[in-house]
Image: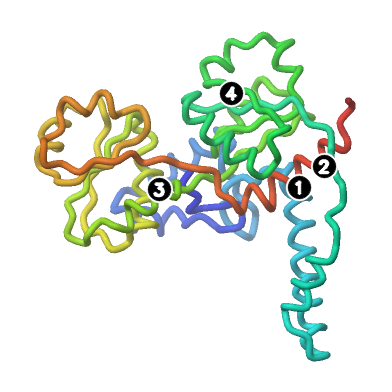
């Protein structure tokens, strides 16, 4: 979910990761086998182990990559005859945008919380346009949907690594995309403002979210020292809150934590947002393709 290992980056070997984490090789091997069984990672002969690539993303990512190469070559061709980048800026300003109004699709997003989903949808609509509406479901609500209702959707979205979970009920012919998530702009700003000697405690409603949350904090606040983590249901929560000056909590924790917070504590919410680059370069081209090729 944190996006540390994407489909084009090899995972560490069992031996290397066991040494890095200080755990037995058998522990890492069992974890890899579990992830393979869930359809999240795959071993490619002669290359190594990788996060499973969403095959429906591939053609659109390849098209964007080819376009970027052509544009770089165009920049070089312009430089060879003495033109700067401003030439292209002027050309763009003089060129009317094509009037492309593809039909919208029946879309839905499945995640842990409808409140969080709605914030993701807002970011997604900034890229796809607000004519494209997106319904929201929690995983529990998704599991309860009638098959007829499921089949009425033309395009599904979910959170990272949850495509196999949806694919159990969604036909292979129906696209499912999972945007990478990064800390929101407000969260990144708050993280950058923390002093290096700040004692930080991360609290998550879900134990499984803590690794992604910790990775996100480390990426955007590399200056911080020791960072402690704890789940909301942990028995030692009250003691941990009392011993840390700064609390960063995941969505859904605030009402539980507020009565327990010391008066001197600084606390703010850790919020994710879909990665803008993924939305621009992967999701929008795929969405546009399916808009053009789906039956009305």
Q: Position of residue 217 (x, y in %)?
A: 35, 51
Under tag 2, what secondary structure?
helix
The Cα–Cα distance between marks 3 and 2, rounded to whole angstroms, is: 33 Å
Q: Nearer the viewer, residue 292 or 17?
A: 292
The tag earlier along the polypeptide, 4 or 3, is 4
Tag 4–tag 3 contact (CB < 8 Å): no
The Cα–Cα distance between marks 4 and 1, rounded to whole angstroms, is: 22 Å
Residue visible at 51% across and 38% down in the picture: 35
Residue visible at 43% across and 47% down in the picture: 183
For label 1, the residue is 285
Q: Position of residue 122 (x, y in %)?
A: 57, 36
- Comparing marks 1 and 3, which lies closer to the viewer? 3
Q: Position of residue 290 (x, y in %)?
A: 81, 37
Task: Say few, some or many: other residues with alpha carbon within 10 Å of mark 2 (under 14 / 14 to 19 / 20 or more).
Answer: few
Q: Which mark is residue 289?
A: 2
Figure quadrant of residue 286? top right
The tag earlier along the polypeptide, 2 or 4, is 4
Q: Quadrant of the C terminus?
A: top right
Q: Is residue 218 left or right of residue 139?
A: left
The Cα–Cα distance between marks 4 and 3, rounded to whole angstroms, is: 23 Å
The Cα–Cα distance between marks 1 and 3, rounded to whole angstroms, is: 28 Å
Q: Which mark is residue 209?
A: none
Tag 2–tag 1 contact (CB < 8 Å): yes
Q: Is residue 243 left or right of residue 247?
A: left
Task: Say few, some or many: other residues with alpha carbon within 10 Å of mark 3 (under 14 / 14 to 19 / 20 or more).
Answer: few
Q: Nearer the viewer, residue 109 or 231?
A: 109
The Cα–Cα distance between marks 2 and 4, rounded to whole angstroms, is: 22 Å
- Comparing marks 3 and 2, which lies closer to the viewer? 3
Under tag 3, what secondary structure?
helix
For label 4, the residue is 136
């Amino acid at each position: 979910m944190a996006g540390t290992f994407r489909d084009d980056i090899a995972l560490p070997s069992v031996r290397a990761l066991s040494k890095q984490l200080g755990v037995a090789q058998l522990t890492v091997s069992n974890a890899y086998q579990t992830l393979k069984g869930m359809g999240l990672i795959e071993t490619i002969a002669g290359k190594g182990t990788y996060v499973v690539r969403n095959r429906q993303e591939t053609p659109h990512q390849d098209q964007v990559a080819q376009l970027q190469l052509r544009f770089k070559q165009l920049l070089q061709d312009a430089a060879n005859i003495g033109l700067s980048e401003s030439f292209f800026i002027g050309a763009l300003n003089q060129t009317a945008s094509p009037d492309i109004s593809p039909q919208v699709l029946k879309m839905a997003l499945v995640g842990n919380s409808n409140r969080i989903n709605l914030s993701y949808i807002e970011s997604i609509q900034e890229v796809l346009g607000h004519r494209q509406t997106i319904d929201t479901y929690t995983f529990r609500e998704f599991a309860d949907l009638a098959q007829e209702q499921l089949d009425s959707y033309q395009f599904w979205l979910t959170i990272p690594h949850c495509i196999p979970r949806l694919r159990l009920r969604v036909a292979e012919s129906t696209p499912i995309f999972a945007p990478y998530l990064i800390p929101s702009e407000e969260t990144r700003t708050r993280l950058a403002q923390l002093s290096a000697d700040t004692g930080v405690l991360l609290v998550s409603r879900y134990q499984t979210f803590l690794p992604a949350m910790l990775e996100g904090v480390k990426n955007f606040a590399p200056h911080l020292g020791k960072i402690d983590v704890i789940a909301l249901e942990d028995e030692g929560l009250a003691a941990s809150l009392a011993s840390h000056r700064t609390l960063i909590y995941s969505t859904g924790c605030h009402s539980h934590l507020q009565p327990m917070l010391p008066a001197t504590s600084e606390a703010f919410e850790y919020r994710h947002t879909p990665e803008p680059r993924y939305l621009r370069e992967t999701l929008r081209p795929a969405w546009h393709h399916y808009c053009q090729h789906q039956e009305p």
